[in-house]
Amino acid sequence: MKVILLNGSPHQKGCTYTALHEIQNVLTQQEIDTEIFDIGTKPVGGCIACGYCYKNSKCYMEDRVNEFVKKADSADGFVFGSPVYYASANGSLVSFLDRVFQSGGQSMRGKPGTAIVSCRRGGSTAALDSLNKYFAYNNMPVVSSQYWNMVHGNSPDEVKQDLEGLQIMRTLGNNMAWLLKCIQLGKENGIELPQAEPWQRTNFIR
Ligand SMILES: Cc1cc2nc3c(=O)[nH]c(=O)nc-3n(C[C@H](O)[C@H](O)[C@H](O)COP(=O)(O)O)c2cc1C
């Protein structure tokens, strides 16, 4: 079993990473493979609604989005991490995830997901809400913790002083491991994902 931890910060070893790393340690203790995937510092373009992905099952733009979707196929669970920017998730991460879900959401359907945020002071719950919407849109069980998934700090050292925040991350890692093991056991006993109905699309035109 494998979990991909997506670091939505431009800082490879910053505050968001510090929180993700706490989850990663717990997953490793639980014998679950992990990979931290950085969105990096190159500009991430947003979805241009060209429809290329409907026919080709990938984004027209060959960048880390397609790389992520390929890896997502063989992963079993996901943690999306973001620094809070202007009381929301990092704009680059939002662009990244819009394109991931538009072009490759199928590879994540039915797999557990969770989001964590890192902030200096405020806007954390609004940022979390925006990230949780990706899972809810895509038939993904959302993993929770003992409190909302956030750490506070403006540097990794400050995050390390947020003892409650780090405990929330560890609880989250254990809950993710528990759910993955339950799903695995279910599969071994013939419990499959429900068959999806053809999508009934209703646009509100009246
Ligand atoms: C453009 C920008 C906007 C930010 N907006 C907020 C904010 O709204 N609320 C907040 O508490 N911190 C804000 N911060 C601070 C970061 O969220 C915080 O330092 C975070 O822990 C950095 O994580 P990182 O080291 O993984 O990049 C902002 C930082 C930047 C660069």
Image: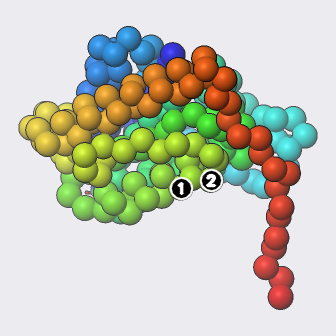
Quadrant including the C terminus: bottom right
- Height in image: 40 above or below 31? below
Q: Residue at x 33, y 60 (%)?
A: 125
- Height in image: 139 above or below 184? below
**Residue 89 at what x, y percent from top left?**
43, 53
Q: Residues within 10 Å of mark 1 (few under 14, many from 20)?
A: few
Q: What is the distance, in whole Å, between disc 2 and disc 1 at their CAs?
A: 6 Å
Taking the view exactly as shown, the residue that stands out farthest to the right is 55
Taking the view exactly as shown, the residue that stands out farthest to the bottom is 206
**Contact between labelled residues 1 and 2, with CB atoms less than 8 Å apart:** yes
Q: Residue at x 78, y 34 (%)?
A: 58
Taking the view exactly as shown, the residue that stands out farthest to the front is 189
What number of labels is visible?
2
Q: Residues within 10 Å of mark 2 (few under 14, many from 20)?
A: few
**Residue 38 at what x, y percent from top left?**
47, 29
Q: Is residue 152 left or right of residue 196?
A: left
Q: Residue at x 73, y 31 (%)?
A: 62
**Residue 48 at what x, y percent from top left?**
75, 53
Amino acid marked by disc 2: Tyr
For the residue pair 60 and 72, the one nearer the viewer reads as 72
Secondary element under disc 2, as helix, strand or loop, is helix
For the residue pair 81 and 9, the one nearer the viewer reads as 81
- Residue 137 in sight from this viewpoint: yes
**Quadrant of the rendered image containing residue 204:** bottom right
**Quadrant of the rendered image containing residue 28:** top left
Q: Which residue is mark 1?
A: 133
**Residue 137 at what x, y percent from top left?**
62, 53
Q: Which residue is mark 2?
A: 137
Is the CB of mark 2 within 8 Å of ligand 1? no
Q: Is residue 125 left or right of residue 121?
A: right
Amino acid marked by disc 1: Lys
